[in-house]
Image (cartoon, rainbow, N blue to C red):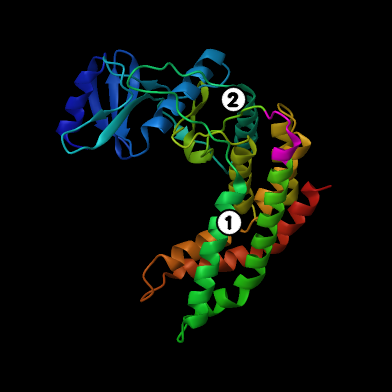
Amino acid sequence: MNDRAVALLEQYEIEVLRTRKGRGAILCDTQRGCLIFKEYTGREEQLRLQERVLKHLEEQGTVPAERLLATKEGALSVTDRDGVRYILKTWWEGRECNIRDREECMEAMRLLARLHGDLEFTPVFPETEETSAPVIERYLPSRDYEKRNRELKRARRFLKQRSQKTWFEIRLSAVIDPFLEEARQLCEEWKEIELAASDSGEEVPLCFCHGDYQYHNILRQDRGFFLVNFEKCQADGPVRDLYLLLRKLLEKSEWDAEWGRVLLAAYESVRPLKPYERQDLVYRLSYPEKLWKIVNFYYNSGKAWIPEKNQEKLDRLLEQEAARKKFLKLLQR
């Protein structure tokens, strides 16, 4: 980030004492504490939603989280002469949540449950002549997974047509069909559940989620945890966050079923899952997302040289598959 970008800080009601480089951003020591100034590539509507969610969390006072700061004119972002946009947020100096520390992982689960307890609300947006309230659409998992299934099918067709295959491609060709069939069946069941829910006419509370709740975005300091990077927050159920963190932690532990039970119990000690949320969690964990990621990276990369890392990830996935199925059975009891 260059000096021109730093000059944009003059548009904020702050006194910058010192700046230093962070991860793709500028950390600013100010009279209001440490702030972070970083590029923003999302939509304005998403930024306004993020600001409203974070403001609501601050009002609740339960979960320490970042806040977006507005300019002197009330704008949530600033733009340099090259058209690059930036946002300014509060920041805590700290380290990421230690995924090898089981106590910290359980604490992160309990914090997530408190976060979800605060994010069941209907946001009110101030409207002006220039802006209207963002349109909030509920997330439908089947839409994402239908798209992913189409991508898996394209990759399978490509593999079948490829005459000379590497060892990775031979291995992937041999295992992709059962995963794709599992993905197709799950997507069909998901659509039926979504259709039944819409036909029931029952009013489902509007609930938001962090959208990217993983250890990189859970910072630890002496005062406790601090949540950052809400850029992906959206109107999806709490299971989106729970699924993401649970899957990542279980992958690191070879899908240890007992550890998964302990993590889920930590979450439910604060916020018990509703029956439909538990079903949602089973479906998300059942979808072969890890395989889709491996296939998507392979299909959209150059084929002249396939990184050895691809083979390692596929081997690890296949080694963990029996343990993953075991945990899913435990979850459905």
Point out residue 17 in the picture as x, y percentages from the top left corner.
23, 18
Q: Are marks 2 and 1 in contact (CB under 8 Å)?
A: no
Q: Give the residue at the far right of this rendering.
A: 333
| Rendered view: 67 above or below 173 | above
Q: Quadrant of residue 239?
A: top right
Question: In percent of the image, x 57 and y 50: which residue is there?
Answer: 143
Question: In percent of the image, x 75 and y 47: which residue is there?
Answer: 258
* Magenta stretch in the rendered image: 197-204
Residue picked out by circle 2: 119
Point out residue 173 in the picture as x, y percentages from the top left corner.
56, 77
Disc 2 packing (10 Å; few <14; some 14–19; many ≥20): many
Q: Is residue 203 magenta?
A: yes
Left or right: residue 86 compared with residue 264? left
Residue type at tag 2: Leu
Residue picked out by circle 1: 146
Question: In percent of the image, x 53 and y 40: which residue is there?
Answer: 214
Residue type at tag 1: Glu
Q: Is residue 54 at all visible to an observer of this figure?
A: yes
Tell me the element at label 2.
loop
Q: CA distance from mark 2 to mark 1?
A: 27 Å
Point out residue 65 in the picture as x, y percentages from the top left corner.
48, 24
Tell me the element at label 1.
helix
| Rendered view: 253 above or below 182 | above
Q: Quadrant of residue 10?
A: top left
Quadrant of the rendering where the N terminus is positioned: top left
Q: Give the residue at the far bottom of this rendering.
A: 163
Point out residue 51 in the picture as x, y percentages from the top left corner.
43, 24
Left or right: residue 308 compared with residue 12? right
Left or right: residue 27 compared with residue 287? left
